[in-house]
Amino acid sequence: MSSYNQEQYDALVMVRRYVAGLGDDEKAGLVVSLDEYLRFRQSVDDFLQTHFGSVCNQACYQSRLSACCSREGIVTFFADGVINVLLSTPQEIDRLAETLRQDDNGLKCVYLGRNGCLWRLKPIVCAMFLCDRAENGVFRERPALRRQWEAYREHKKRFTWPDRPVLFDNLEAVFIAAGRTSPLMYLHNSPGLIRVKQEALRRNKKAYKRSAVYNGLQGNAKQDERKRNKLENHG
């Protein structure tokens, strides 16, 4: 088994076991936390199917080039796997595990089956990948669509870019709190993403100290201190 397949397989097994051990309410709570993200993904899928469905089918899948499913292009976040397990049937998870145990899929992604991606919900990087040829072919004469696509890319950061509390970071944290770790937990392992979170925390602290709420609390604290001093002096 390749190192890539091993990492993917280990994460899949760990997530599956953890989810299987959850109570009904705990699992339902995790699924509910995905609502906004799933609405976003459905909107992205509708956009891509409407404007790129025929382009990608002809340019890649029929020609078997499939540039967006090359092995080098596949990056999965740990949260991608958690979300997929939560949405998948046991049979679909079995299929993923079996596929990962087969070491070689040529130059294609290990998850690329005869009928497309084996994931119930594709990793976010895969779902939002557009090659230059496809982008130029569709957007060249339709700049409004390009602006809409850029808005989708910005919206994606609300779930994946940890300059604020985001779903992908929260899902990693759930597993870390339960004593599980994985190399795929990029939002807790990547030095770059850790710096993003640290810088966001510093900015938030500065903004809070400038806020009326903070100043009000400080003012109240000072008033309380003055009252205590008066009582002590009076005593």
Image: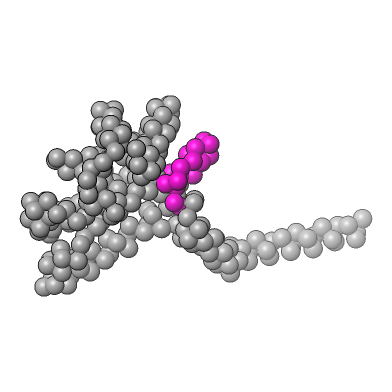
Q: Position of residue 149 (x, y in %)?
A: 23, 63
Q: Nearer the viewer, residue 152 or 121?
A: 121
Residue 144 visible? The answer is: yes
With respect to residue 33, does 92 lie above or below? above
In the rendered image, which quarter contains the C terminus?
bottom right
- Name which residue lies at 42% across and 46% down: 184
- Name which residue lies at 12% across and 66% down: 138
Residue 31 image-quadrant placement: top left
Q: Nearer the viewer, residue 96 or 21?
A: 96
Q: Position of residue 216 (x, y in %)?
A: 63, 64
* 193 left or right of 128 in image: right
In this picture, which residue range is highlighted in magenta?
171-187
Residue 164 visible? The answer is: no
Q: Position of residue 92 (x, y in %)?
A: 25, 32
Q: How many marks?
A: 0
With respect to residue 4, does 156 lie above or below? below
Q: Position of residue 164 (x, y in %)?
A: 46, 58
In the rendered image, which quarter contains the N terminus?
top left
Q: Nearer the viewer, residue 84 or 22?
A: 84
Does the magenta-highlighted stretch encompass residue 112? no
- Name which residue lies at 74% across and 63% down: 223
Identity of the residue furthest to the right in this view: 235
- Name which residue lies at 41% across and 58% down: 161
Does the magenta-highlighted stretch encompass residue 181? yes
Task: Give the colouring mode of the picture.
Answer: one colour
Q: Nearer the viewer, residue 226 or 131?
A: 131
